[in-house]
Amino acid sequence: MKFILSIDQGTTGTTACLIDAETFLFVGKVNKEYPQIYPKPSWVEHNLNDIWASVESSVQEVLKKNNVRGNQIIAIGITNQRETTCAFSRSGTPLANAIVWQDRRTTDFCQNLNTQKNLPEKIKLLTGLPIDPYFSASKMNWLLNNNSAVKEAALVDDLLLGTIDTFLLYKLTGNINHKTDASNASRTMLMNLKTTSWDQELLDLFNIKKEYLPIIEDSFHTFGVTKGLSFLPDNIAITGILGDQQSALFGQAGFFEGEMKCTYGTGAFVLLNTGDKLVYSKFGLLTTVEYRYKGKPCYALEGSSYIAGAAVQWLRDNLQIISKSSEIEKLALEVKNLDELKHILFFPFFSGIGSPYWNADAKASLVGLTRDSNRSHIAYATLEGIALSINDLLTAMKNDTGLAIKTLKVDGGAVENNLLMQLQASISETKIIKPKVIETTAFGAALAAAIGAGLVEMDQLKNIWQMDQEFTAKDSLAAYTKNKKELWSKTLNTIYQNI
């Protein structure tokens, strides 16, 4: 048997998956978590050595667990947390902790850019993005100005910058191939959407030299081959790279215009494939590259909610009202009377607000509590807060496109929570469709690798996707959710509009 190895490098851990190269069926997966680093309030970092160790151990374990030899792998696909920014030397040695996409340290810098006449509009036209700490450019600028090891490496031509896919590809290829794909590059705020090349005007604005950056290539082709690894043999081709949200849409068979999905991970992300059309949002969404193939970009509209599953982790780790994330559904279901919840709202804005409001200074809040409020009320309100945040993204998507969104494919770890899915269906008045393979991010990277390796053509993959379960709006919740949405909008505007 031959296999595709998919490496899904996420915000809280790395998942290595094996997929049968002929049937495209999942064979096995192993996840390895690694520490989150919070040096200061609103700062989030990852140790790149921790990330690389999680890749090594997850790949080793998934091979061992499934009795697969390294020489049975014929292609590797990579998908990754996107805007997280790396700085490393030509020897592959990290020069600093990675600055994670959630990090807000460059808020003041971005706010200054936003005050410059016509600059926000110009950057959005070039990149499809608002000026925000979320994206990589301001993080790279910060490293160049504030990290001594990065400064010194830049002086002696020993500095390489990139997103996580860039770092993994470089390490996998024996410190040879410094490359990225267009979907990841589109999240840096340094790539011109029309040309899918680094834009010199943007590089100058952020004081970043082009030679620090990886080469931008198609998402499906041979980026390089493995070399000098302890856990894989040499000469396995890396043939697919996609940013995690683009990969999830791909894994949901969203290859062509009109396909849409929402991923519930650490954050939540809605993507709509717009084909070869560059659609600029008027309602706070992002324009991004879904993939580039044979030199031609396929575009998407995206809504980004920074916090989804991370809110549940906060209940687990900080409040300690649950011992594991899966317990939140049982706890929330202890609420028997929704009238007890009608004034309670949880705004999960621990890292500011992304789409559609773009408020970098926003903080999370829990409002409407009374003396009889308890753990179950907070658990329920947390799930509602996630669903209401995503509903704001869907509303923006409807307003931008004029589409009546009646169905939404969903994926990610949180879709195992049936209560959350039911809440989303009722709040958004949309049929929620869960696939049989919920590891769609890793699955998308495997499909990308299959195309890049010439194993299959894109249109042949359409029938691989299969539905597992669907959730529809409950009439019994209609009055409650209508009132809750109105309270959400009113309270959100009151609390956050003047921050």
Image (spheres, rainbow, N blue to C red):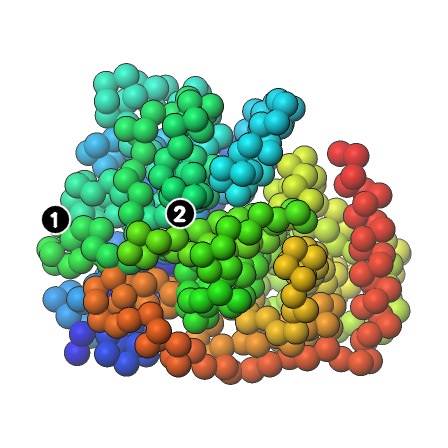
**With respect to residue 337, does 320 lie above or below?**
above
**With respect to residue 243, does 452 lie above or below?**
below
Quadrant position of the C terminus in the picture? top right
Q: Looking at the image, which residue is at 16% across and 44% down?
A: 174
Local crowd size for mark 2, using a 10 Å CA cut-off: few (<14), some (14–19), many (≥20) = many
| Left or right side of 394 for 27 | left
Residue 431: which quarter of the image?
Answer: bottom right
Query: Which sits earlier in the primary sequence, circle 2 or circle 1?
Result: 2
Instruction: Name the residue that disc number 1 marks.
Output: 228
Distance between mark 2 and mark 1 Cα atoms: 26 Å
Q: How many marks?
A: 2
Local crowd size for mark 1, using a 10 Å CA cut-off: few (<14), some (14–19), many (≥20) = some
* Amino acid bearing label 1: Gly
Determine which of the numbered discs, if any, sits on residue 184 in the image. 2
Q: Nearer the viewer, residue 308 or 247?
A: 247
Q: Nearer the viewer, residue 77 or 116?
A: 116
Quadrant position of the N terminus in the picture? bottom left
Whole-percent x and y of residue 17? Answer: 32, 67
Residue 404 appears in view: yes
Whole-percent x and y of residue 224? Answer: 18, 50
Whole-percent x and y of residue 357? Answer: 69, 44
Residue 176: which quarter of the image?
Answer: top left
Nearer to us of marks 2 and 1 is: 2
Looking at the rendered structure, the secondary structure element under dot 2 is helix
Q: Looking at the image, which residue is at 59% across and 71% down?
A: 408
Residue 167 appears in view: no
